[in-house]
């Protein structure tokens, strides 16, 4: 009988440990998901702000923007030919 009591106690302790580990993992998962959403929102905001800035710069000096785009295209073309 004593052996059964010990086994029963061990099973209960194991069950509590599993529940505690499951709770901790759930909390960690929620925290990581929240952090990832926050980072994605910040990245989207930075992207939109940068895009608005580039659009404004392009409207103010279109020739400079065109020359810059041509230069970047030329460099990319040179790099692509070398491969």
Image: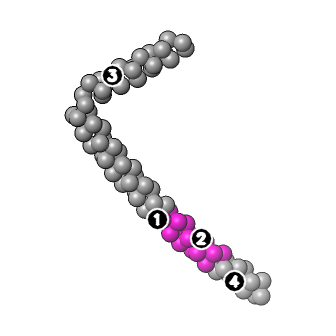
User: Gap between marks 2 and 1, in whole Å?
Assistant: 14 Å
Of labels 4 and 3, earlier in sequence is 4
Residue 15 seen by the camera: no
Q: Is residue 80 left or right of residue 38?
A: right
> Which residue matches tag 3?
67
The residue positioned 27% from the left and 43% from the top of the image is: 52
> Which secondary structure lies at badge 3?
helix
Residue 39: quadrant of the picture: bottom left
Q: Earlier in the sequence, mark 4 or mark 1?
A: 4
Q: CA distance from mark 3 to mark 1?
A: 48 Å
Alpha carbon distance from label 4 to label 2: 18 Å
How would you rate the neighbour count of disc 1 (Cα within 10 Å): few for under 14, some for 14-19, many for 20 or more?
few
Q: Is residue 82 above or below residue 18?
A: above
Tag in front: 4 or 3: 3
- Please name the residue that numbered disc 1 is placed on: 30
Spot occupied by residue 22 in the image (x, y as percentages of width and height)? 55, 69
Asked if the stretch drawn in magenta spans residue 17, the answer is: yes
Measuring from the top left, give residue 64's x and y in whole percent: 30, 27
Secondary element at image label 1: helix
- Tell me which residue sits at (35%, 20%) in the image: 70
Nearer the viewer's eye, disc 4 or disc 2? 2
Sequence-first disc among 2 and 1 = 2
Range covered by the magenta-colored residues: 14-31
Instruction: Report which residue position mark 2 lands on.
Output: 21
User: Which is closer to the viewer, label 2 or label 1?
Assistant: 1
Q: Nearer the viewer, residue 36 or 43?
A: 43
Inspect the magenta stretch and tell me whether residue 26 lies in it: yes
- Crowd rating for badge 4 (residues with CA inside 10 Å; few <14, some 14–19, many 20+): few
Task: Name the residue that disc number 4 marks.
Answer: 9
- Density class for disc 2 (Cα within 10 Å; few <14, some 14-19, many ≥20) is few
Residues at discs 4 and 1 in contact (Cβ within 8 Å): no
């Amino acid at each position: 009988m004593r052996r059964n009591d010990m086994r029963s106690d061990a099973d209960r302790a194991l069950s509590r440990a599993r529940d505690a580990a499951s709770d901790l993992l759930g909390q960690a998962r929620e925290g990581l998901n929240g952090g990832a959403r926050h980072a994605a929102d910040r990245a989207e905001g930075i992207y939109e702000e940068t895009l608005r800035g580039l659009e404004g710069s392009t409207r103010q000096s279109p020739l400079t923007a065109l020359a810059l785009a041509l230069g970047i295209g030329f460099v990319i073309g040179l790099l692509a030919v070398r491969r």
